[in-house]
Image (cartoon, rainbow, N blue to C red):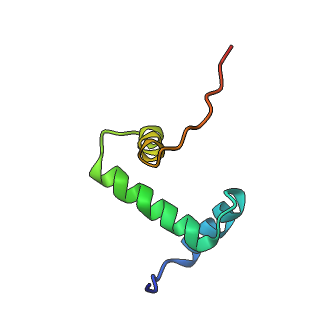
Amino acid sequence: MGIVKIADDLHEELRKSSGVMCRSINAQAEFWMKVGMLAEANPTLSFTEIMARQREAADVHAPVIDAA
């Protein structure tokens, strides 16, 4: 574990986002870092595609909502 220095305004956005997403501030920062790393490694994939592949890799079966 280490300490990462970030700007105060980014920390404030992390704090607000973590509340909305029901994550700790650290968990929200880790999520953003992981998604950013995956996006850089896979520049042709959208956020939705990255998340779908992560769920598939974890064998998560999310329900699909029909647009009827």
Quadrant hosting residue 8: bottom right
* Rendered residue at 46%/49% (across/down): 58
Image location (x, y in percent) of residue 16: 68, 64
Q: How many marks?
A: 0
Q: Position of residue 26 (x, y in %)?
A: 57, 73
Residue in the foreground of this view, choosing between 18 and 53: 53
Q: Is residue 25 left or right of residue 36?
A: right
Image location (x, y in percent) of residue 29: 52, 68
Residue 62 pos. (x, y %): 59, 37
- In the image, residue 29 above or below residue 55: below
Q: Residue furthest top?
A: 68
Tell me the residue at 69%/13% (across/down). Answer: 68
Q: Quadrant of residue 44?
A: top left
- Residue 28 versus residue 61 in the image, above or below: below
* Position above or below: 36 against 29: above
Residue 62 vs 15, above or below: the answer is: above
Residue 12 left/right relative to 44: right
Where's the N terminus, which quadrant? bottom left
